[in-house]
Amino acid sequence: MKNIMFIAPPAAGKGTQAELVEGKYDIPHISTGDILRNISKEDSELGNYIYETLASGKLVKDEITYQLIEDRLRQKDCKKGFIIDGFPRNIEQAYEYDNILKKLGYEIGNVIWINIDKKILEKRITGRRICENCKTIYNINDENSSPKIDSICDYCGGKLYQRSDDNLEAFQTRYAMYQEKTEPIIKHYKKKKVLFEINGDNSIENIFTEIEKIINK
């Protein structure tokens, strides 16, 4: 089993695919965000620093993130493979990630790029609605996933709401940042011949089938 890194723009379904891979292949899904949030709950100098940094909307120092990732990758459950999520976010972090893997004797593995047209992502983001009770997700811009009754959940009758950041302006900002930071990472791993591109404009099942083909090579 190879290590896996997912690269994808906002709303491309990266999290869903990571969960499917984790379930099918029984390898840990390592989210840097989860690691930081868990440590922020600790009553320690590091925990307090991370809590205050996250609460202020700032980024945790790279040196701390690198050490936390290295510590997590040293754990026994990563020996047979893992999924890295939320890291690296820029080319400098990609270089350091490669160094960490080299130090631990791990291969980079498969870097899977879920690529999808920006206009499709816009529709996904601006049309997304969530049930306030059962958290079922709908999309009013897609007839196959829109609710039968406007603003009402099909399953529990709960009210549907739109997240505050699910608007066009916020999406365009996030997408522009993704392009700026991610393009060099894509080129980096393409040069290393470990990058695999998948069309994200497909069903969840078909995308997962393509991922399985890459993993099982």
Image (cartoon, rainbow, N blue to C red):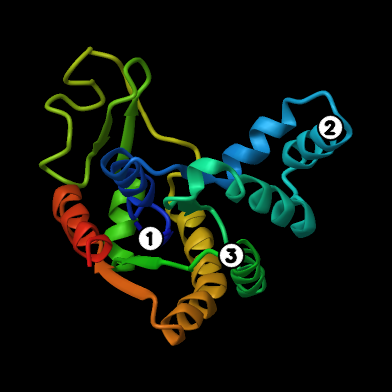
How far apart are labels 1 and 3 at the CA level?
12 Å
70 shown above or below 172 = above
**Nearest to the observer: residue 62 or residue 66:** 66
Q: Secondary structure at mark 3?
A: helix
Which kind of residue does numbered mark 2 sit on? Asn
Residue that numbered label 1 is attached to: 2
Residue 135: x %, y % from top left: 34, 24
Which kind of residue does numbered mark 1 sit on? Lys
Residue shown at the point (20%, 27%) measured from the top left: 150
Say whether residue 59 is visible. Answer: no
Give the position of the C terminus as an image quadrant: bottom left
Mark 2 residue crowding within 10 angstroms, few (<14) / some (14–19) / many (20+): some
Residue that numbered label 3 is attached to: 101
Left-right relation of 185 to 26: right
Say whether residue 163 is visible. Answer: yes
Mark 1 residue crowding within 10 angstroms, few (<14) / some (14–19) / many (20+): some
Residue 13: x %, y % from top left: 32, 50
Q: Secondary structure at mark 2?
A: helix
Residue that numbered label 2 is attached to: 48
Counting the numbered discs, the total is 3
- Mark number displayed over residue 139: none
Residue that extends furthest to the right in the rendered view of this protein: 45
